[in-house]
Image: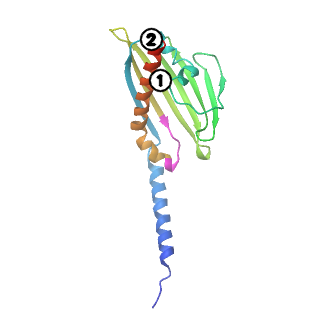
Protein backbone atom coordinates (compact mmCIF):
# COMPACT_ATOMS: atom_id res chain seq x y z
CA UNK A 1 0.00 0.00 0.00
CA UNK A 2 1.35 3.35 -0.97
CA UNK A 3 1.10 6.31 1.38
CA UNK A 4 0.80 9.91 0.23
CA UNK A 5 3.21 12.60 1.37
CA UNK A 6 0.74 13.84 4.03
CA UNK A 7 -0.57 11.71 6.87
CA UNK A 8 -3.97 12.21 8.56
CA UNK A 9 -2.45 14.29 11.37
CA UNK A 10 -0.80 16.65 8.93
CA UNK A 11 -4.04 17.06 7.01
CA UNK A 12 -6.05 17.79 10.16
CA UNK A 13 -3.51 20.26 11.56
CA UNK A 14 -2.98 21.90 8.17
CA UNK A 15 -6.74 22.23 7.64
CA UNK A 16 -7.17 23.74 11.12
CA UNK A 17 -4.36 26.23 10.48
CA UNK A 18 -5.89 27.16 7.13
CA UNK A 19 -9.30 27.77 8.77
CA UNK A 20 -7.65 29.91 11.46
CA UNK A 21 -5.83 32.05 8.90
CA UNK A 22 -9.03 32.50 6.87
CA UNK A 23 -10.97 33.53 10.00
CA UNK A 24 -8.23 36.00 11.00
CA UNK A 25 -8.09 37.37 7.45
CA UNK A 26 -11.84 37.96 7.44
CA UNK A 27 -11.52 39.59 10.89
CA UNK A 28 -9.01 42.07 9.48
CA UNK A 29 -11.52 43.08 6.81
CA UNK A 30 -14.40 43.63 9.25
CA UNK A 31 -15.18 47.14 10.49
CA UNK A 32 -13.60 48.17 13.79
CA UNK A 33 -15.88 51.14 14.39
CA UNK A 34 -19.30 51.03 16.02
CA UNK A 35 -21.98 53.37 17.32
CA UNK A 36 -24.72 52.87 19.86
CA UNK A 37 -27.36 54.86 21.67
CA UNK A 38 -30.13 54.84 24.23
CA UNK A 39 -32.71 57.33 25.40
CA UNK A 40 -35.20 57.74 28.19
CA UNK A 41 -36.95 60.22 30.43
CA UNK A 42 -36.31 61.06 34.06
CA UNK A 43 -38.66 62.93 36.37
CA UNK A 44 -36.06 65.49 37.45
CA UNK A 45 -34.61 68.86 36.60
CA UNK A 46 -31.57 69.16 34.32
CA UNK A 47 -29.47 70.24 37.34
CA UNK A 48 -30.45 67.10 39.30
CA UNK A 49 -29.29 64.90 36.40
CA UNK A 50 -26.17 66.91 35.54
CA UNK A 51 -24.67 66.19 38.97
CA UNK A 52 -24.21 62.58 37.80
CA UNK A 53 -22.78 63.52 34.40
CA UNK A 54 -20.27 66.34 34.87
CA UNK A 55 -17.73 64.45 37.02
CA UNK A 56 -16.13 60.99 36.98
CA UNK A 57 -17.48 60.38 40.50
CA UNK A 58 -21.00 61.05 39.24
CA UNK A 59 -20.53 58.46 36.48
CA UNK A 60 -19.16 55.95 39.00
CA UNK A 61 -22.50 56.09 40.84
CA UNK A 62 -24.45 54.61 37.91
CA UNK A 63 -22.03 52.96 35.46
CA UNK A 64 -19.65 49.99 35.87
CA UNK A 65 -15.97 50.74 36.58
CA UNK A 66 -12.79 48.69 36.99
CA UNK A 67 -12.05 47.51 40.52
CA UNK A 68 -9.51 49.65 42.39
CA UNK A 69 -6.43 51.39 41.11
CA UNK A 70 -8.29 54.56 40.14
CA UNK A 71 -6.26 57.77 39.93
CA UNK A 72 -8.13 61.07 39.75
CA UNK A 73 -6.82 64.16 37.94
CA UNK A 74 -8.03 67.50 36.62
CA UNK A 75 -10.79 69.70 38.00
CA UNK A 76 -13.53 68.25 40.20
CA UNK A 77 -16.24 68.90 37.59
CA UNK A 78 -16.50 69.78 33.94
CA UNK A 79 -14.04 69.65 31.07
CA UNK A 80 -10.75 67.98 31.97
CA UNK A 81 -12.04 66.00 34.97
CA UNK A 82 -10.49 62.56 34.53
CA UNK A 83 -9.88 59.13 36.04
CA UNK A 84 -7.16 56.66 35.00
CA UNK A 85 -6.94 53.00 35.97
CA UNK A 86 -4.75 49.94 35.80
CA UNK A 87 -6.74 46.71 35.95
CA UNK A 88 -5.54 43.18 35.20
CA UNK A 89 -8.85 42.18 33.56
CA UNK A 90 -9.86 45.43 31.85
CA UNK A 91 -6.41 46.80 31.04
CA UNK A 92 -5.20 50.34 31.59
CA UNK A 93 -7.34 53.22 30.51
CA UNK A 94 -8.86 56.61 31.15
CA UNK A 95 -12.22 58.37 31.29
CA UNK A 96 -12.25 62.13 30.67
CA UNK A 97 -15.07 64.65 30.67
CA UNK A 98 -14.32 66.65 27.51
CA UNK A 99 -16.95 69.36 27.83
CA UNK A 100 -20.12 70.36 29.64
CA UNK A 101 -22.57 72.63 27.88
CA UNK A 102 -24.51 74.59 30.50
CA UNK A 103 -26.83 71.86 31.77
CA UNK A 104 -27.69 70.63 28.28
CA UNK A 105 -25.00 68.12 27.34
CA UNK A 106 -21.83 66.38 28.44
CA UNK A 107 -19.19 64.95 26.12
CA UNK A 108 -16.59 62.42 27.25
CA UNK A 109 -13.90 60.08 25.98
CA UNK A 110 -12.68 56.68 27.12
CA UNK A 111 -9.37 55.15 26.08
CA UNK A 112 -8.36 51.58 26.95
CA UNK A 113 -5.04 49.95 26.06
CA UNK A 114 -5.89 46.52 24.73
CA UNK A 115 -3.91 43.48 23.67
CA UNK A 116 -0.74 44.20 21.75
CA UNK A 117 -0.82 47.87 22.74
CA UNK A 118 -3.86 48.64 20.55
CA UNK A 119 -5.91 51.53 21.94
CA UNK A 120 -9.68 51.12 21.95
CA UNK A 121 -11.48 54.42 21.96
CA UNK A 122 -15.02 55.43 22.85
CA UNK A 123 -16.38 58.96 22.48
CA UNK A 124 -19.80 59.75 23.85
CA UNK A 125 -22.26 62.42 24.75
CA UNK A 126 -25.35 62.71 26.89
CA UNK A 127 -27.87 65.40 26.03
CA UNK A 128 -30.50 66.62 28.47
CA UNK A 129 -33.68 68.23 27.15
CA UNK A 130 -36.47 69.52 29.44
CA UNK A 131 -39.90 68.14 28.57
CA UNK A 132 -43.31 69.73 29.04
CA UNK A 133 -44.36 67.62 32.06
CA UNK A 134 -41.38 68.80 34.14
CA UNK A 135 -38.93 65.95 33.58
CA UNK A 136 -36.04 65.63 31.17
CA UNK A 137 -35.41 63.58 28.08
CA UNK A 138 -31.97 61.98 28.00
CA UNK A 139 -30.22 60.91 24.80
CA UNK A 140 -26.94 59.00 25.26
CA UNK A 141 -24.82 58.23 22.19
CA UNK A 142 -21.43 56.60 21.77
CA UNK A 143 -19.08 55.87 18.91
CA UNK A 144 -16.02 53.73 19.20
CA UNK A 145 -13.11 52.11 17.47
CA UNK A 146 -11.82 48.78 18.74
CA UNK A 147 -8.52 49.08 16.89
CA UNK A 148 -7.18 47.05 13.99
CA UNK A 149 -7.22 43.57 15.51
CA UNK A 150 -8.70 40.60 13.62
CA UNK A 151 -10.55 39.32 16.68
CA UNK A 152 -11.99 42.74 17.56
CA UNK A 153 -13.51 42.95 14.07
CA UNK A 154 -15.89 40.16 15.05
CA UNK A 155 -16.65 41.87 18.35
CA UNK A 156 -17.44 45.14 16.56
CA UNK A 157 -20.25 43.37 14.68
CA UNK A 158 -22.21 42.94 17.90
CA UNK A 159 -21.20 46.15 19.68
CA UNK A 160 -24.09 48.34 18.51
CA UNK A 161 -26.75 45.99 19.86
CA UNK A 162 -24.86 44.95 23.00
CA UNK A 163 -23.74 48.45 23.94
CA UNK A 164 -27.20 49.94 23.30
CA UNK A 165 -28.68 47.40 25.74
CA UNK A 166 -26.05 48.25 28.38
CA UNK A 167 -26.59 51.98 27.86
CA UNK A 168 -30.37 51.57 28.36
CA UNK A 169 -29.67 49.72 31.62
CA UNK A 170 -27.34 52.56 32.64
CA UNK A 171 -30.04 55.15 32.03
CA UNK A 172 -32.43 53.11 34.18
CA UNK A 173 -29.83 53.10 37.00
CA UNK A 174 -29.31 56.85 36.54
CA UNK A 175 -33.07 57.45 36.88
CA UNK A 176 -33.16 55.32 40.06
CA UNK A 177 -30.24 57.22 41.61
CA UNK A 178 -31.69 60.63 40.73
CA UNK A 179 -35.07 59.62 42.23
CA UNK A 180 -33.36 58.28 45.39
CA UNK A 181 -31.48 61.58 45.83
CA UNK A 182 -34.62 63.70 45.77
Q: In terms of sequence position, does the residue under pointer 2 or pointer 1 come before the other?
A: 2
Asked which quadrant contains residue 112, the reply is top right
Say which quarter of the image contains residue 42. Answer: top left
Picture layout, residue 169 above or below residue 32: above
Residue at (43, 9) in percent of width and height: 45
| 56 drawn magenta | no
What residue does disc 2 label?
A: 46
The single residue placed furthest to the bottom in the displayed view is 1
For the residues labelled 2 and 1, the Cα–Cα distance comes to 15 Å
Q: Is residue 26 above or below residue 172?
A: below
Q: Which residues are magenta?
A: 144-151
Quadrant placement of the N terminus: bottom left
Q: Residues within 10 Å of mark 2 (few under 14, many from 20)?
A: many
Find the residue positioned furthest to the left.
Answer: 132
Which residue is labeled 1 in the image?
125
The structure residue drawn at horizontal position 59% and vertical position 46%, both measured from the top left corner, is: 115
Say which quarter of the image contains residue 130. Answer: top left
Residue shown at the point (46%, 44%) measured from the top left: 155
Q: Residues within 10 Å of mark 1 (few under 14, many from 20)?
A: many
**Looking at the picture, how far across and down is residue 91, in whole percent?**
61, 39
Amino acid sequence: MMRGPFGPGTIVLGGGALLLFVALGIGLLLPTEWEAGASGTIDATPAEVLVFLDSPEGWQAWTPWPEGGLVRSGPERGGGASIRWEDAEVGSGSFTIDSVESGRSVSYSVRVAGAGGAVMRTDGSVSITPVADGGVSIRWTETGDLGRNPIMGYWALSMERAQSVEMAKGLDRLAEIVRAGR
